[in-house]
Amino acid sequence: MKKLLVIAGLVAFSFPATAQDTPTRVTPDALAWKENPSFPKGVQLATLVGDPAKAGDVVVLRIKFPPNFQMPPHTHPYSEVVTIISGDIGTSHGETFEKKGELLKPGSLWVYPAKHPHYAWTGNEEAVLQVQFVGPGGIDYINPADDPRKK
């Protein structure tokens, strides 16, 4: 019975992914990296799948952080699944930035629920994350002074 529930959950989770209109293949050299006014200067995003502004869309983004970077505490209106693609990055949760724990290596994964305060930092090299969520996207900074849209 437990196995059946797990399989049913996996099938149900896969339905939004099948909502894409056409098969999609993305290669690293095809990514269009852009700065986003919602993120601090130096952070670049590339959308691989979906429209972050569209409700119900399955979205896959890559986010590139510069070396020695600190992403301030923030939340999102969605649950997110994050995988490190390259570089080393630290992440923790809470409303106050504090480097807790070691830097994680490529291939590491974490999940934060919707509206869960968290933050991140990089080591001495650039780091790239892949973030998956169901739209709409958004970011709210715990400290309004950290929000680059208000500067």
Image (cartoon, rainbow, N blue to C red):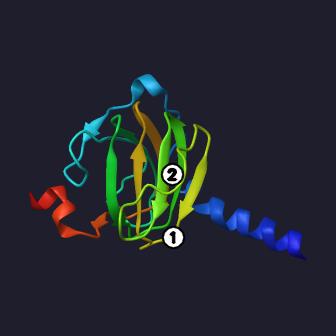
The x and y percentages for residue 79 are 49, 66
Give the crowd class for mark 1: few <14, some 14-19, many >=20 residues within 10 Å: few
Q: Is 50 positioned to the left or the right of 19 in the image?
A: left
Residue 126 vertical position relative to residue 17 in the rendered view, above or below: above
Q: Is 66 positioned to the left or the right of 59 in the image?
A: left
Residue at 17% of width from left, 55% of height from top? 148
The x and y percentages for residue 103 are 52, 44
- Point out the image quarter for the N terminus: bottom right
Q: Is 92 positioned to the left or the right of 6 in the image?
A: left
Q: How many marks?
A: 2
Residue at 58% of width from left, 37% of height from top? 106
Q: In the image, what residue type sits under mark 2?
A: Gln
The x and y percentages for residue 68 are 34, 38
Residue topped by disc 2: 20
Q: Secondary structure at mark 1?
A: loop
Residue at 53% of width from left, 36% of height from top? 85
Q: Nearer the viewer, residue 44 or 48?
A: 44
The x and y percentages for residue 29 are 42, 22
- Can residue 68 be seen at all in this image of the molecule? yes
Residue that lies at the very extreme toward the top in this rendered image: 29
Residue at 36% of width from left, 61% of height from top? 97
Q: Secondary structure at mark 2?
A: loop
Residue 120 vertical position relative to residue 105 in the rendered view, above or below: below
* Badge 2 or badge 1: first in the primary sequence: 2
Residue topped by disc 1: 113
Q: Is 27 positioned to the left or the right of 12 in the image?
A: left
